[in-house]
Structure formats: C-alpha cells, structure tokens
Amino acid sequence: MTIEVAAAHPARAAERARFQRERRRQALAQVVRTLSTVLIALGLGFIITVFVSDKPVQAYVALLAGPLSSTARVGTWIEDATTLTMLGLAFAVVFRAKQFSLLAEGQLYLGALAAGLIALKLEAPGVLHLGIAMLAAAAAGFAFGLIPGALKAYYGANEIVSTLMLNVVAVRMYDLLLTYWLKPPGAGYTWSNPFPASAIFTRFLEGSRINTALFVAVGLVVLTWLLVYKTPLGYELRMVGANLDFARYGGINERRVIMLSMALAGIPAALAGAHLAMGVHQRLLLNISLGLAFEGLVVALMAGNHPLIVPFAALLYSYLRIGGDIMERTAAVGSDIVRVIQATIILFITAELLVGFARRRQARRIAHAAG
Amino acid sequence: MRGITKVYPNGVVANDRVDFTVQAGEIHGLVGENGAGKTTLMKLLYGLEQPTEGEIRLRGQAVQIRNPHVAIDLGIGMVHQNFMLVPEFTVAENIVLGLEPQQRGFIDREKSVEITQDLARQYGLQVSAAARIDTIPVGMRQRVEILKTLYRGAEILILDEPTAVLTPQETMDLFAAVKTLVRQGKTVIFISHKLREMKAVADRVTVMRDGRVMGTLPVAEATEETLAQMMVGRKVLLRVEKPPARRGNPVLQVHDLKYVSETGHQALRGVSFNVHSGEIFGIAGVEGNGQTELVEILTGLRIATAGTVTLTDKAVTNRTPRTVRQAGMSHVPEDRLRNGVALPASIAENIVVDRYFAPPFTKYGWWMETGEVKKTAEDLMEEFDIRAPDSEVPVRALSGGNMQKVVLARELSRSPKALVAAQPTRGIDIGATEFAHRELVRIRDRGAAVLLVSADLSEVMALSDRLAVMHSGEIVAVFDRPRQLTEEEVGLYMLGLKRQERVH
C-alpha cells in the first residue's frame, strides 16, 4: 500500500518521510531536554542545600547517592517505587478520560482492608491465599470507583468533590474495622496481627525489602498500556478524554466509560494498598498511607499519563523521597528543607514537561502550515 | 501598505511582501481562501499584530500602529466577525462604552441615547437605541458594531466577513448601509469569500492567496470565475453540477416531531417530512429556528418530546446515537469543532469512531488492530484528499477544510442509507466547498436520502432537489423545484412573513 502511494505521489511521500524524521528528531530532543532539566534542577537543589547545611556536599551526596549505598536502601527505594507505580497507573487511567477522580487514596485503603481481611480471616495454601487477597483488593477498588463514577455519569456530580468525600468514608471505615475488630486485645499499637506467611509478598533479595509485588507492578504497567492503547475500551477512554461531545456523537456510551474509568483506576490503586499491607508492613496498621496516593498523582503528571513512562517517573520520584530521608537522617538537614528541595526539583521537571507539550503543539502548527 | 511581510514566531509566513492600497472613499473588497493572509493583513492595519517588514502609510504619512488605540486615533475601525458587544447592555450603552458622555461623574443615559439616534440617522443605520443587545436580531447587532466604530471617529472601516451571519434581506440592507457610508466620505474594506457579494458591493477587489497578493482589479472587469481562479490557483466549478434526481422510496420519515427545551422554549412545533432515497431534501431557515434541535433528534443526540422518526421502516425515535448509526444514519454535524472531531486525537482515531468496535478493527471482542485502523484511515485520506503527512497527525493541526474532509470521509465511507448534513461547508474554503458539494451529490446518486440543513441560502437552493423552509419550529413551506425560486422569495418565508396554506 505504502509503495503504491509513493508511486502515485512521490512529492507527498517525500514530504511524509521528512515529517516523520522531524517527529523522531523532536522526540529525541525532548528526552535530551528532560535529562538536562533534571541536572539543572539538581543543581538548584544543591544551591538551597548550601544555604541550610554546614556540610552541604556531604548532605547532597546523601541525597543523590544515598539510595544506592546499600542493598537495604536499594530495596527500600524499589519497594516505594512499586507502590508509586501502581498509584501512578491509577491516575494515568482516569486522567486519560479527563475524569479528575482523586479516589485513589480511598481505593488504596479499601484495597489494603480487603487484602487484610482475606489474609487474616481466610486460610488457603500458599500462592492461592495471596492471589485471593489480591483479587479481593482489586474488586474492592473497582467497586468503590463505581460510586463516584455513577454519580458523575448519571447525576452530573462533580467527581473532585465526591471522591474527596468518599476518601474520608473509606479511611474511616478502615480505621473503624481495624480498631474495633482486627486489633488484638492488649496490643500496644493500633494494628492487626501479622499476616501468615501464605499472605505475604515474598522478599526475594537477601538483605532487602524488594518483594514479589514488584512483578505485579510490572504486570500492571503492561496491562494498563494494553488497556489504554490496544483495546476498544481504551480507545473509548481516550476519545471521552479528547472530546466528550465527539465521543457521544460517534456512538460511544460515555456514561459507561466515565464509570469504568474510575472503577478500573481502582484496581492498581487498591493493589497499591494490598502491597502496603502484604508487602511493606505485613499487617494492617493505622495511617497505612498518609496521602501517598497524591504522590501517585504527581508521578502520573510527570509521566504525561503514559503507562509505560509511569514506572520511570515513579523510580525517579521515589529516589528523591528515599534520598531525602537519608539526607535528613545522616546530614542533619531538617525534614522541611528536604521537602523544599524535593519540591523544587519536581516542580522544575514537571514544568519542563509542560513546556515540552507546548512546544510539540507549536511544532504541529508548523507542520500544518508547511503541509 | 507596502512590502508588508509578517512572519509569526513559529515560522509561518502569513504575509509575504504584500502591497495593498485603498483609496479614500472606495469600497475595497479583500478576498481569499482561509489562511490566505487576509485576516493577518487586517490585524496589522488595526494594530493587533506588528509587521516583520514593510511600512504602512496613511494619507501619505508613514505610521506605526502599535496597538488598536493608535489605530482608532488614526481613524481606523474594525468590525469583527464575532461581535464584541455586551449582551446585557442596551444598544446606546454599547455604542458609548468606554467614551460615555458624563454628567457630574455619572453616565448621562439620555445623552447616550441621543448620540446613538443622531449617529443612526446620519449614516442610515436603523437601530433601537434603548433595546438590550440580547433582544435584537443579528443584523441590528452588526449595525450597532458599525455605529460603535463610527462613534470613535473611524474614517476607514474594516468589515471582517460581515455577511456570514445575515439573511439575504439583512445582507441587502447592509450593502445599502455600506454604500451610504461611502457616500459620506468613509472608506470601507470589506472581507469576504463570497464572490457574488464582492460583485454586488465593492468598487475594487484585491485577491490574496498563500500570503501574497495575486492582484487588485476593478470589480467591473472581474467575473466570479476569474476571481475564483485567482483565489484557488486553478479552475473552479462554482455552479453545482448535478444530474436530475432519481427519487426512490421514502427512507427517512419524520412525523409530528415536537421538542420543548428545559427552559420551556418550544423549539419544534410538529415537524413532518419524508426524505426519499436518491434525493437531497434541503432545509433553509435563519439559524435558531429549530434546525439544530431537529438534527440532533434525528441523530440520537437529543430526546424528542413527541413524534416519531423512522429510518427504512425501523423506528429510531430517541434511540442512542450508536443505534441510529447502526440503522444506517450518517451525520455531518453543524459545529465540527464541538463534536465532529476530537482535536487532540489523530486523524485515524477520528475516522474510526463509528466502527472501531467491530471487525476488522476489533478482534475477539477486545483486541484492537491498530494497523487496520491506520490502513483504513490512510486509504480514506487518499480517497477524500485529506492533506496531511500521515494518519497519526492530530486533527488539531489540520485546516478547517481538511477537518471537514475527515468528517466527510468518516460519514460517507460507511455507505449510509440516510445522511443528515448540517452546515456542511461552514467556514471552509472554496476548494473544500466544491469537494463537499460533489460528495453530497455522489452519495445521493448512490441512493442515499440526504437531508441538508444550511444557513447558506444559495448553497441549499443550488443543491436541494426539494426545499423546505423552517421558521420558529415549523416547516412553513416546501418547494418541489427550488431552482426556480429567487432568494428573496425564500427569504420572505425564512423571516416568517409568508407561509404556504397547506404544507405537504
């Protein structure tokens, strides 16, 4: 087919080749730009450090090299990135459909709760136990997402408001069940009994916390990518996000898509909760997340809502989180300042990404004018 | 204006060494396709943009027009295509806005009304000074815009596509008013792409194409054909070539359709008609007389209050858009930017929105064959002459004409039984308009029932095999031989001044 076209329109084929070369060149330039922005941002972070620390070099080395300084620390980094990848995917899905659901935090709590209940109250052999717990978590996250989805699709309720309120409901329900039912009598802390070994993500690297949930996260990345780009439902999500009126006009059932976007996002979010329960803490405890989902939002933003970029954004973001903790502990820089440095770097990178979007849009205009 | 070049920061050359001279006291027409650089040139003159090169001379003096305030001080006024009026204010308040006559720090309302009436009398532009803008018709709003610029002392008036929103009668009134202005010593630059209007009103015409001036000539020496050729760069068919219709059985049957909006407005008051296979049934009418509601009900986007719609004997009243489409209905929507395309999505994604869920695009019910999507899109780009490097280009990057071709490619390639085409050539250039007209006739000749709704009276009269006129939610006339009518005659029905005794 391409050959026929080329024969019929040699000029147009040449123009097309030029356009595609230009597109590839710009994609590469974008990567280079992003990397240099990271460097500039890190430089800026260092300047701040100079002002707040007696030993700025030492402090900054702790931030930049800390996470790699021991197997245990690498493990902590990967473990944190695993959770953030899952949460980033959750936001990548709803944002694709331009639904501003912030339910991930609530879905995380319900996911942890569902996984915890299966872990503590059900007996099953080995992998099956873990599998059932994950399924229960996913189901809880999915079902919870249907509520704001239906409210938005059928009653036009603003999803930002409804999801923020539902988050409180989920967190309180978790607290209630944990405090009055799951907490063993006489425990000194509000937490459950530790989970049995059959309901725990196995740590497979000696001396680190890296666990098998890592593979779950990788699987979710691939599945989310398939969902968004390779299924009719993914196409519907993207069209609803691109132009809701167009989707409706074209025959897409936009209400179903809105509901499903919030429900499907619940699956990775709830599994992030399952990871916290069955991988990180190996039990349920009070304040298991403390707003972690909103860090997932930043990860999705950094990744431009692209599922395949989410894990890299999560790795970068987690690296700064873990590095910041290490800097705080080893170099006596206050945690507030560490947050400021982190925020500066993240802000810089995110802003650069947005500039990148604007540039690409402009490039399209040039392409249009030329064609 | 001499040697004007304008290069936008993104490298687009909108004006390339343009020479443009307007003589005092003339009506100077400026024509060209969309993107030819007319609007940019006028923005430079009105100070909204700065030229990269070249100079502007006014009455022999080189001037620098840094912003619209300078332009207004120099006596240049511009009437934009989209009116810049405050809808909640009265006519008089809008005219004096920013330059209000004052009395002890308060606005002198009586004086405002007086000023308005004086201006209106002086230039022969009828307006009701005390009426609120949102209660007056479009034609009067335009006169208010013109008076507003005159009140600010404009000697040179730029009218940007002023007739796009007017009925034939209002257009005639506007032409008369423009001629009065010129008689009183004003100079008018009249932008349009309707060549017939140029012939009717302008003294001289300048034609632009691709940012360059192709020539300036007295209207008396130009024909519509030569102007069109200068605009497009090749011979253009202005008349719609159309073999006689071979009318078949009724395909789209509409019976007693009623619609009451949420605000209680009766938008449709019992509309009935049949569209037969192999014919183009046109609906003319001033916009806002129920056409939008009618089209949306027929295509499943709006729920009718009462009445039935049948498509080849299948009831499709108030079904979902998908059901209606599956029954064989295609829809070219009136506002393609609102729902005809998804701007950020690619051409390919825009083309398959009505078929992505079925083979060969979706296999096993869940796997989407993106290769198949691309292939279909590129075939259709070839067939419908959509000019873009490939099917991955976002629709946002296309011109209006190419966007409409994406819509046409999608809606016509599915061999529809019925096609509802609303304003199919709005805002697209002559070349694309010609293309769209040909495609509508082609789909008709393949046996589709075509319902054409258009505010462009000459278009709907030229294309339709039968013509209906809508006025305030009703069909007030149906003509079997639209080509034998005059626009003025149809205009009387459009304005509700006349109606047929019994509408069949």
Image: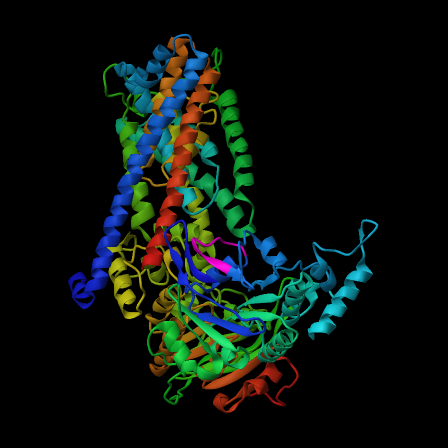
- Asked which colour scheme the image uses, the reply is rainbow
* Quarter in which the C terminus of chain B is drawn: bottom right
Q: Is residue B473 visible?
A: no
Which is more toward the observer, B95 or B166? B95
Name, please, the residue furthest toward the front.
B60
Which is more toward the observer, B35 or B140? B35
Work out whether A284 lies above or below B354. above
Query: Quarter of the image holding residue B15?
Result: bottom left
Query: Quarter of the image holding residue B23?
Result: bottom right
Dominant SS in magenta: loop
Q: Position of residue B162 (x, y in %)?
A: 56, 70
Which is more toward the observer, A143 or A306? A306
Q: Is residue A182 magenta?
A: no
Work out whether A357 lies above or below B138. above
Picture mark count: 0
Residue located at (46% from left, 17% from top):
A337
Q: Which residues are magenta?
A: B47-56
Which is more toward the observer, B321 or B62? B62
Residue located at (48% from left, 62% from top):
B1
Residue located at (77% from left, 61% from top):
B112
